[in-house]
Image: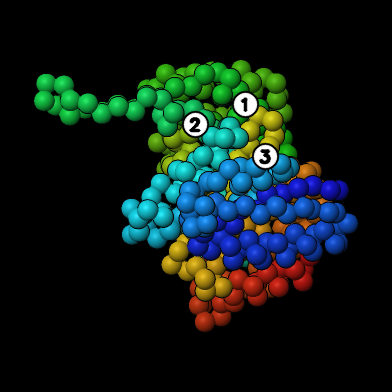
Amino acid sequence: MKKTISILPGDGIGPEVMEQTIRIIKKIENKFDHYFTLNHGYIGGAAFEKYGCHFPDTTLHVCKNSDAILFGSVGGPILESHSVKWKDCEKNSILALRKNFQFSSNIRPAKVYPELQDICPLKDSVIGENGIDIVIVRELLGDIYFGEHKSYIIDNIRKAHDISEYDEKQIEIVAHQSFKLAKLRKNKVTSVDKANVLDTSKLWRTILTEISKEYPDVTLEHMLVDNCAMQFFINPSQFDVLVTANLFGDILSDAAAAIPGSLGLMPSASFNVKGFALYEPSGGSAPQIAGKNIANPIAQILSFAMLLKQSFHLIEEANSIEQAVHSTLKAGYRTQDICLNKSKAITTSEITDKILSFI
Ligand code: NAD
């Protein structure tokens, strides 16, 4: 197969985990006889240094001429977020990319690897015999982020509002995506809303219920978001695919990020209605560990595996990467973020060597 992939390493640990992922890409090309053209683009602070902006036209051009985007991470140290280089960096790069390509949903798996149960913050009794393996589908283009934001003063009282809006088409897209995903997993969708209070949630619930009739094999369950936040920590193994609106998804997917034990393990993908997608680790640029060859490359490597599976339908190739990651962890190799005994941790490039050896 011949395909073109945009490679946008970005800032902080982005370039180093991307460099290791490119080694994995080359191995997959050789082993399975594919040819991937990798077109590199600058984004974030790295782009600012070269072009004076966070998302230059050349990078947009690279993305538009590719079959999928593999993104690293952007942003600088939190304390420097007001400097010219870092101000609005995420907004101008990753949010601009989402807007440009109209990515309407985000998929984020959160699971506990049996080999890494010791770093999951939940007790073994909570993890249970079946383990935890959740996929969160978050709607990305509607809700309170895109309605009117206003701050004003009336009768000397400072007021503000943010309007949340949804239309049925936006909800239908993520509903179909969730049911299709559940069919490949355990046939269960939990739709999370606040339908006891919000009209947008009542519409959400109605549409999910309507669409569920097209997927008779999949069980649909509705859950209020406040209860869901609690269930994450008392009975997380009940979830298979969880679908929710933009704001609730933003918060719940970060809560779920605590479950595997490190952001360095968590891939994610954002899709538009045409199926074009961007794949990236769930975490940020981790500036405090950047440049030391100690970051965990697994989230970036698994983002590439997701790309192979979802965008190129190369299932065997993707499975071979996922299996290699499992084998590496099973053999006891750990980067510092997932290693309880820090003196035994290996580097970013060393753990990639091990993963490569298992592919
Ligand atoms: P972060 O995700 O970068 O780091 C949070 C914690 O997770 C840190 O302890 C970090 O060391 C650890 N971590 C994250 N990825 C890791 C990996 N691969 N290996 C080992 N440890 C890892 O979040 P933050 O510190 O809040 O933000 C840092 C910068 O990243 C900020 O500028 C922020 O705006 C940006 N950010 C970017 C994105 C993105 O590019 N999509 C997402 C979130 C944050």
Q: Earlier in the sequence, mark 2 or mark 1?
A: 1
Residue 290: % across, % down = 50, 68
Q: Residue at x 69, y 30 (%)?
A: 274
Rendered position, 276 above or below 290: above
CB within 8 Å, label 2 to label 1: no
The residue beneath circle 3 is 64
Quadrant in the picture for the C terminus: bottom right
Residue 217: % across, % down = 72, 28
Q: Secondary structure at mark 1?
A: helix
Instruction: Tell me: is circle 1 under 8 Å from ligand 1.
Output: no
Is residue 336 at all visible to an observer of this figure? no
Q: Secondary structure at mark 2?
A: loop
Q: Secondary structure at mark 3?
A: helix
Eye-nearest disc, 3 or 1: 3
Is residue 203 at all visible to an observer of this figure? yes
Viewer-nearest residue: 6 or 208: 6
CB within 8 Å, label 3 to label 1: no
Viewer-nearest residue: 82 or 320: 82
Q: Earlier in the sequence, mark 2 or mark 3?
A: 3
Quote the CA–CA distance across marks 2 and 3. Answer: 27 Å
The residue beneath circle 2 is 245
The residue beneath circle 1 is 173
Q: Earlier in the sequence, mark 3 or mark 1?
A: 3
Give amino acid for label 3.
Answer: Lys
Residue at the extreme left of the image, as rendered:
156
Give amino acid for label 1.
Answer: Ile
Q: Residue at x 78, y 62 (%)?
A: 26
